[in-house]
Image: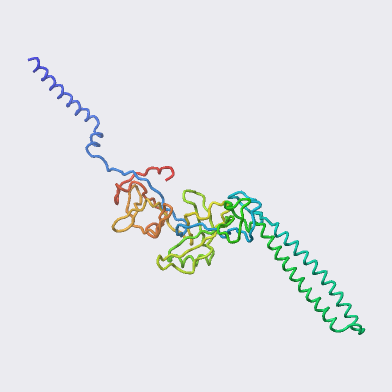
Amino acid sequence: MAKRGWIVAAVLLAAGGMAAYQTRASWYPERAAAKVAPGPRKVVVEVAKAARQPVPVAVEAIGTVTPISSVALKSRIETTIVAVHFQDGARVKQGDLLFTLDARQIDAQIEQAEGALARDRAQLAGAQRDLHRYSELIGKGATTQVNLDNARTQADTLTGTIKADEAALDNLRVQKSYTVIRAPFDGRISAANVKVGNFVRPADVAPLATINQMAPVYVTFAVPQAVLSDLRDAMASGSARVVASVPGREASEQGKVAMVENTVDATTGMVMVRGIMDNGREALWPGTLVNTRLIVRTEDAVVVPSAAVQRSQKGDFVFVVGDGKASVRPVTVARTAAGNSVIASGLNGGEEVVVDGQLLLRDGTLVQVRERKAGA
């Protein structure tokens, strides 16, 4: 009986609690109504403004850095290395002394040639005196014409001999100049392939060292043949520019188009373009692969973040926010670059387009705009 009494008491207590809850709900009718009929749900989105601004028409490609001038230093005589006057990989200026070669043998030959020249000049002076003397005697009838002719022949022969001696001496002096090797232009030199005491010859395959010009440099890359017409117009007007940057680095170098190859590769439909870059900071190293942008011209266009552009079977579209609602706006994308899309038609500029939260949107959906994340 006691157990049954406890059960009856529990039932009565539960019934009383339910009646109290219903009575309390009647005290707040607006909460009850909100719970019964919730309002329309808003989708939280991030937006960005479609901006009308000058946009460069550019072609991106992978290019290669090549030096304008590159020289392999070699010996032009057979001799030995006496001194190396640079550090491996150092910057050199035009005229800097790089190698000194043994010139003792050539110095001896030069002294020998100078002695022969002095001897022949002395003989020529004697022959000219004889010619002058015979010329006076022939007028007095004191000598024969044969003696005069022989004196003139001897003087002429020695004159030719002296010219040959002078030419031989000049040749030896040129050979002597080969014993001193200097930098032909400003640049950066490689490691020296020879050291002091090495014997070198003109027939050696490996150069003594190599110098590459570092500033300016060439950047060579390929562009589609469809760009060729616009590129030629831009070169004629002087508006064509080339921007090159090393992957992974923010720094870039700017330059101009130096030349366009005179043929298009029939197998790929690409044409080679060469840009010349100042490269004063030596950011572009010969042989490096770089990202290049060929800027053909600049035009006024509407730009939106590429994240705003959605794709469907009917084409590209964006969600435009207005009066708290999102509406579908078909657009035509002209091109995409650097995370932005250039809109050819569909937007006039100034519209707010959704860049995050499109998954829950459809035409006419109520939206709530939230602040964009820093750096977006």
Q: Nearer the viewer, residue 85 or 286?
A: 85
- Residue visible at 88% across and 80% down? 135
Q: Is residue 373 left or right of residue 91?
A: left
- Please name the residue shown 49% across and 63% down the image: 273
Residue 59 position within the rendered picture, expressed as x and y whole percent measured from the top left: 45, 59
Q: Is residue 316 left or right of residue 155?
A: left
| Residue 9: x %, y % from top left | 12, 19
Q: Nearer the viewer, residue 45 or 11?
A: 45
Q: At x 45% / y 62%, what residue is drawn? A: 223
Q: Is residue 164 visible?
A: yes
167 vs 363, nearest the viewer: 167
Q: Is residue 248 left or right of residue 92?
A: left
Q: Position of residue 277 (x, y in %)?
A: 55, 57
Q: Residue at x 63, y 59 (%)?
A: 78
Please state the horizontal and vertical placement of residue 370, each as a whole percent of the image. Answer: 37, 43
Q: Residue most toward the top?
A: 2
Q: Taking the image as drawn, is residue 215 in sight?
A: no
For residue 103, which quarter of the picture?
A: bottom right
- The image quadrant where one finds the N terminus is top left
The figure's colour scheme reads: rainbow
Q: Is residue 236 above or below residue 337?
A: below
| Pick the front one: 59 or 130 | 130
Q: Is residue 153 above or below residue 65?
A: below
User: Quadrant location of residue 35?
Assistant: top left
* In the rendered image, the vertical position of residue 315 relative to residue 143, given as above or below: above
